[in-house]
Image (cartoon, rainbow, N blue to C red):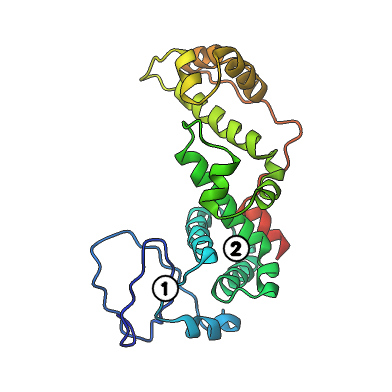
Amino acid sequence: MTAGTWINAPPKSPFAVSLADELISDRAQDERLQLYLNRDSFREIVPLLDASRGRPLDGHLSNLLAEYMILLERNLPKLTTDDLPPLKAAISTMIAACIVPTPDRIAAAESQIDLGRLERVRRVVRNYLRSPLLGTELICRHLGISRSPLYRLLESEGGVARFIQRQRLRESCAALCDSSHNRLISKIAREFCFSDATSFSRAFKNEFGVTPREMRTASRARHRPRPKPTETAAPVANLKNLLRSF
């Protein structure tokens, strides 16, 4: 309860409170991510925060804001003091767009919104990595978007199918390098939804420059090969890269 109002916030539903108000929590012990914003530093969005104070945010963009906050927490240790001014601008733009999603605010926060969407795509792909159902339709359903925005979102990653395959290859590489397991390469291929060991080996070598068997042998000899650079890959979308636009 805050400011005399009870807040019933579902998991991953952001809500705004003021430290000037008493806050009484009746929730069981759980993980909670809090983003503290100084009113003087973020004065341009203070009216929006005050207007939304004491109620959970809802809608599709609120879910993206939750993902964005998780992304911020994970990336903060990688940022430098030079990144802080653009980070402040990016956070302000993203919060304004998610609290009051006018066309102008959404347009201004497009890169940050896409970053939140890309984080959600990664989460869906990780959860369904071993499922043959993983594809464009499943990802669109989980994100609540159509095919065109998804294709645009993953264009710099080589497309939807390429993005999924790359994640599967990375996980299969980790499985091959795990000395505690001795699964057949053909079983690992089937686990990550490759049709057969031959197509898996071909895709694996295209990605890493060595065959699955060579990777396993080198790993057990404690000499894991360095993956070859991807020839045509665009820069991976991440928070640090996108801050350059602010």
Q: Is residue 159 visible?
A: yes
The quadrant holding residue 164 is top right
The answer to whether 156 is drawn above or below residue 8 in the figure is above
Query: At numbered mark 1, what does the secondary structure look like: helix, strand or loop?
Result: loop
The quadrant holding residue 11 is bottom left
Front one among 7 and 23: 7
Q: The residue under label 1 is which amino acid type?
A: Pro
Query: At numbered mark 2, what does the secondary structure look like: helix, strand or loop?
Result: helix
Q: Position of residue 177 (x, y in %)?
A: 46, 21
The answer to whether 87 is drawn above or below residue 197 in the figure is below
Query: From the viewer's perspective, is 159 left or right of 36?
Result: right
**The C terminus is located in which quarter?**
bottom right
Tell which circle, 2 or 1, labels the residue nearer the N-terminal end.
1
Residue on which the image places disc 2: 81
Q: Position of residue 23 (x, y in %)?
A: 30, 80
Q: Position of residue 209 (x, y in %)?
A: 65, 20
Residue 56, numbered circle: 1
Front one among 205 and 148: 148
Q: Which residue corresponds to the image point at 49% horizontal and 46% vertical from the top-left?
A: 123
Q: Position of residue 151 (x, y in %)?
A: 69, 46
The quadrant holding residue 87 is bottom right
Q: The residue under label 2 is which amino acid type?
A: Thr
